[in-house]
């Protein structure tokens, strides 16, 4: 009898997590103001700089494939999770969730999972564009490694999004996220190589988690990294923890 109750509880809990994730994905894909910019911005940047201005040259297209995929992954996580949390706090839904017989961890799991799904879609679409419109060549192993980096790389920025979304309402969160994300993308060398930027930008690039994710994406395509892969992984894990812990505390307490 006890075993049956335990199994029922386990199945019910797993179903809650799955349904919350499915509903979050359904909500995202029913919101054109979110999914269209999230999917199209990184693809348009890649088309403009790698295909049109870069003439589809193999090395530059491969480099931009890694970097703009990182840009899209972080954008999906920061805006998708951050604005979702901020909106639900503002309209009282987050407060309602806390009194419902549902673990708050299911809400976070759903938002993180949806962000990773968008990151995967962006990576795969960008790889298709690169193969179809540029001279870039990807082996199956490189393609898999890059998609994995882009997908898992959404996690630290999703944690950052949860924290930023817990600070303000929906309108304020847009400004805060843009203020954090856009300068960080530039200072991390996502839009142009650090060698083309002032020396101080290159000297401080290691301070930004986007830089470390970009290095992992480049390493996935065998473009090389001057630092240990595990250093980049460690920085991203530390970033996830630094933002996730206070963010979860704020969500549970408010």
Image (spheres, helix red, strand yellow):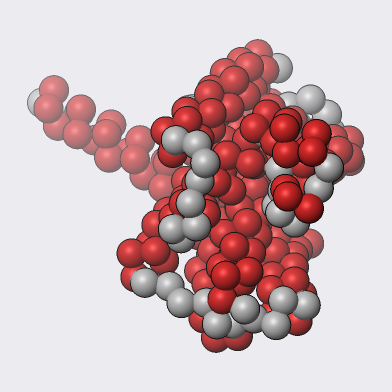
Q: Quadrant of residue 179?
A: top right
As drawn, 9 above or below 133: above
x, y (%) of residue 252?
61, 18
**Is 141 rendered above or below residue 228?**
below
Q: Identify the residue at image location x=44%, y=58%.
A: 222
Q: How many marks?
A: 0
Residue 89 in the image, given as x and y percentages of width and height: 75, 31
Residue in front for this viewpoint, 157 or 100: 157
Q: Seen in the image, is 46 located left or right of residue 102?
A: right
Where in the figure is residue 160, as x and y percent of width and height?
66, 32
* Residue at the image point whose x is 53% and y is 28% from the top: 235
* Figure quadrant of the N terminus: top left
Q: Could you say which is closer to the camera, residue 241 or residue 137?
A: 137
Q: Is residue 61 above or below residue 17?
A: below
- Name the residue at the bottom extreme: 132
Q: Nearer the viewer, residue 145 or 169?
A: 145
Residue 177 on image: x %, y %: 80, 39
Q: Residue at x 36, y 72 (%)?
A: 139
Residue 209 located left or right of residue 89: left
Is residue 52 visible to us here?
yes
């Amino acid at each position: 009898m006890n075993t049956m109750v335990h199994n029922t509880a386990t199945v019910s809990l797993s179903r809650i997590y799955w349904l919350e994730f499915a509903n979050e994905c359904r909500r995202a894909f029913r919101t054109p103001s979110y999914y269209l910019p999230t999917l199209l911005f990184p693809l348009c940047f890649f088309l403009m700089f790698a295909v049109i201005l870069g003439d589809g040259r193999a090395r530059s297209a491969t480099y931009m494939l890694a970097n703009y995929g990182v840009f899209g992954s972080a954008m999906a996580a920061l805006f998708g999770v951050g604005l979702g949390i901020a909106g639900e706090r503002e309209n009282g839904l987050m407060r309602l969730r806390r009194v419902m017989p549902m673990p708050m961890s299911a809400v976070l799991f759903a938002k993180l999972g949806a962000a990773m799904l968008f990151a995967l879609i962006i990576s795969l679409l960008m790889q298709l564009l690169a193969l179809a419109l540029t001279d870039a060549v990807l082996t199956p192993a490189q393609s898999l490694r890059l998609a994995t980096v882009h997908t898992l790389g959404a996690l630290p920025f999703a944690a950052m999004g949860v924290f930023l979304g817990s600070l303000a309402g929906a309108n304020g969160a847009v400004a805060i996220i843009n203020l954090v994300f856009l300068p960080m993308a530039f200072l991390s060398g996502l839009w142009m190589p650090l060698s083309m930027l002032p020396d101080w930008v290159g000297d401080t690039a290691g301070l930004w988690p986007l830089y470390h994710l970009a290095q992992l994406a480049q390493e996935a395509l065998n473009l090389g990294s001057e630092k240990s892969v595990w250093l980049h992984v460690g920085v991203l894990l530390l970033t996830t923890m630094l933002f996730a812990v206070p963010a979860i505390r704020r969500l549970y307490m408010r």
